[in-house]
Amino acid sequence: MMQEYFSELQKSLDGIPSEAIINYDETNITDDPGVKRIIGQRGSKRVYRIMDSSKSSISVMLCGTASGELLPPYAVYGTLHVYDTWRQGGPKGALYGCSKTSWFNEIIFSEWFEGVILPYVKKLPKEVPKAVIDNLSSHTSINVLQKCREHNIKFILLPPNSTHLCQPLDMAYFHPLKAEWRKVLDEWKLENRSPITKDKFPAALKKMLKVTNYNDQTRHNLKAGFKKTGIFPFDPQEVLKLIPKTTENEGDSQTLDNAFRTFLRELFRKETQPLRVRRKRLSVPPGKSI
């Protein structure tokens, strides 16, 4: 499956420069700073780190190019309305929406595509082909595909269940980003002793992304993600070498079939020892041997 994917990917990315190859994915930003080591009294059976947190979470769509450029984020609140204070103080160009589940749906995805992807694509030369790479077919819509056709954009889907191998943002960007978010949460809770409310979230998001001085590290992480997934520079071996190799016995379907049949026979065989054996009490006076 992976070999077929890279064969098609090579054709799709032919002639597309790194700045025109775009990958995006949504991630969940929670109010939980996670578990940390703390100092407690010796001998204490239970030591707690009390941090005021909530179960709220906000979905954020992040997008980057193979050249290392990070596009503005799009945050989705789990409500039916968005208030003006929930959009103030955030990263430059960031967009905000809402849905009942705080996850992207077809309508929000179309708004994100027109508000984030198209403005960036329009800055590139019209004759240059572009490509957006996604891992969920549910993100596609008729409106988005029409916009792709109008602006010379190729919409490429990743193989199913392969984000841990083929998704650039998952490979090298989200992990350090979540670590930075936990630092932001720790600082906030030490100063305020309360969860981050929606009106404070844009400023926290801006701090996490380090808008003023994030360029070097972010560019490095994004490029590393595209390289590890073999997308740019194009190199299928970057991914294929991560897939475990099967031995001759593991690849022999007949051997596996026979082993499985033997396992089932042993599991359901009738000649098993009874779970309980009837016992008979012996009438022997104390002190007498038998």
Image (cartoon, helix red, strand yellow):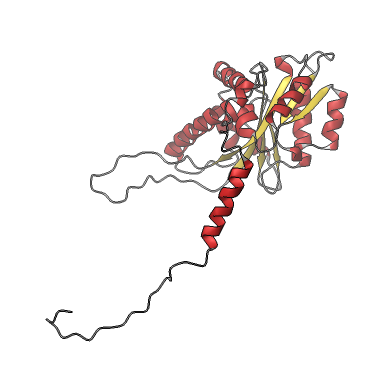
Q: Is residue 260 left or right of residue 122?
A: left
Q: Nearer the viewer, residue 264 or 7?
A: 264
Q: Nearer the viewer, residue 58 or 243?
A: 243
Farthest residue in the left direction?
287
Q: Position of residue 93 (x, y in %)?
A: 69, 26
Residue 177 figure quarter? top right
Residue beneath the point at 78% across and 14% down: 15
The N terminus sits in image quarter:
top right
The relative height of residue 99 versus residue 20 in the rendered view (above or below) is below
The C terminus sits in image quarter:
bottom left
Residue beneath the point at 52% across and 60% down: 267
The relative height of residue 280 versus residue 122 in the rendered view (above or below) is below
Residue 119 figure quarter? top right
Can residue 266 be seen here?
yes
Residue 42 figure quarter? top left
Q: Position of residue 56 (x, y in %)?
A: 57, 46
Q: Nearer the viewer, residue 273 or 181?
A: 273
Q: Nearer the viewer, residue 18 or 112?
A: 18
Can residue 94 be seen here?
no
Q: Is residue 159 left or right of residue 279?
A: right
Q: Position of residue 218 (x, y in %)?
A: 58, 21
How many numbered discs sit on the rendered protein? Answer: 0
Q: Position of residue 84 (x, y in %)?
A: 68, 38
